[in-house]
Amino acid sequence: MQKIIYRLMLIVLSIISLKANAETLAQYVQECATQVGFDPNELPALNCNDGIKFADLNNIQTPVNDYLVHTSFAGSFNRIDVVAACRWLTGISQGRFAAAVSVEMLIHSKANGSTCFFAAKPQPTITAPDGTVFSGANEPLGGLVSTSIVSPQDPNASSYWMQPTDLNSAAFNIAPFSKTPLRCVGCHVAGPYIASPRIAPMLGIFGLLNDGHDTFATRYHAVGSFVSGSAFSSWDTIVSQNNSPGIPACNGCHSIGSNSTASTIYGTQLGFPVIPSLLSDIQSINAAGVMPADASPTSDYRWVNMSTPIPLDDNGEYEFLDNLHLKYPRFYCSNPSFVQAHVVGSNLIFNNHQLENLHYFNLQDGLVCLNAEQPNGEQCPDYQTRYLCDGTWTDWSNRDRPTASGDWEPRRGFPGLCASPTAIQARHDISITSTPVWAVVNGPNDRLAEFDTNGLACNNWEQSSGRCSDYVVRFICE
């Protein structure tokens, strides 16, 4: 009933804002902003080259370079996520890819589930910033797309993005497949993100796995559905017809619809798949169309992002085991032996077994290990530290050796160190022979109030910037 009332409200809003049978890209963007909850002027311009590569297949005739790009900003209801998949990047110009075979983008609010879909239209040629021209005549989709992603709010947006009616009817016409319309929600049926085995690690890096977004289509909603005159008026119906209801918690989080139109985008031509990164993913899905949610304790599907420190006056970032028990019980145990965390948007992973018993280890303070805080009366190892400033590591420094109080390697031990180092590393000798064996670990940006098997806690008030980074954590249970 709640979902029906919500959709009726959306229909009323949409009828007011859309002109029947004349929906333009600009109108769709405005409707997107209304339903998702943001100022359209906040929509950023992105670049595929700034993303993270999630597919690189070199065993076919044409190399594959698929990138996932993400950004977020504060909206009316909650954080707004903007995610783009750039497939088959090509055309090197000035050290960066200039073109892609396809670019698809979605804008999503996990607070109300509203989601907008965009797809770039292939062009016969793409001109790089240095003037180099790349031809798309022989590309499988008949053209190329610039890797400089234009904001849908940009005055030239209609030159880059398909109009709503074109996106609704778009089909990759590759023999032997029919001209079945692709329609994004034919694949994106269990929430906004298809967490395939190949792309799940990148979604985890961006904090988009198990972050509270709807995966059972109770809030998940395609903007424009059930609206007369909207090109996407039938898209929620497609979601409901293709979803996998009734599957126990999180088994259905990562699925492609049982009646998916995915076959139209991975057909073969010239001996290689059009979008190879999807081919093996789709083939690996079982008959129910469901991908594994937690295949193993160390699976990338287990990353959980329960807290996001957006307001500056918020206490901070808390990823506690007790909250995991309440929100994601399939991933919970009472006595985990290992925990990892990473900052959203970063590949850098921190392990509790590397940081345990350190009084602190972060960019603001350096590293301190106190003998009094070591178990069984043990003494701290002898640590060395170094920082990365403006892309260059300093020399290793060892200003202190373990004494009665411990080992102290603070920032002030580096005369002339830059004011805002971007990374810190530490190493200590873990050898049991006369030959040193160095273990190198990387420290987080922030002062962490807690980071152990109970979870991670970061207080905004303890940070020099006044705000914690957005962390993602996962646990392992033996």
Image: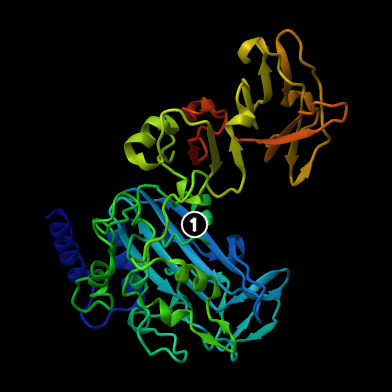
- Which sits in the foreground, 308 or 255? 255
- Which residue occupies 53% across, 56% down? 202
Instruction: Kindly tell me whether residue 421 is visible in this rendering.
Output: no
Which quadrant would residue 224 be assigned to in this image? bottom left
- Which residue occupies 17% across, 67% down? 11
- Which sits in the foreground, 191 or 258? 258
Q: Residue furthest top?
A: 404
Question: In the rendered view of the protein, which quadrant contains the N terminus?
Answer: bottom left
What's the amino acid at mark 1?
Ala
Give left or right: position of 44 versus 147. left
Structural crowding at the residue carrying mark 1, measured as other residues with C-alpha within 10 Å and reported as few (<14), some (14–19) or many (≥20): many
Q: Position of residue 143 (x, y in %)?
A: 55, 86
- Which sits in the foreground, 426 or 226? 426
From this view, report whether residue 163 is shown above or below residue 322.
below
How many dots with numbers? Answer: 1
Q: Position of residue 435 (x, y in %)?
A: 87, 30
From this view, report whether residue 205 is shown above or below residue 107.
above
- Which residue occupies 36% across, 51% down? 75
Which quadrant would residue 326 be assigned to in this image? top left
From this view, report whether residue 404 is shown above or below residue 180.
above
The residue to which callout 1 is attached is: 200
Give left or right: position of 132 versus 222. right
Q: Position of residue 204 (x, y in %)?
A: 50, 51
From this view, report whether residue 445 is shown above or below residue 156.
above
Give left or right: position of 459 versus 8. right
- Which sits in the foreground, 73 or 188? 188
Give left or right: position of 421 versus 263. right
- Which residue occupies 52% across, 39% down? 469
Q: Position of residue 247 (x, y in %)?
A: 28, 55
Circle 1 sits in a helix, a strand or a loop, which is it? helix
Q: Residue furthest right?
A: 434
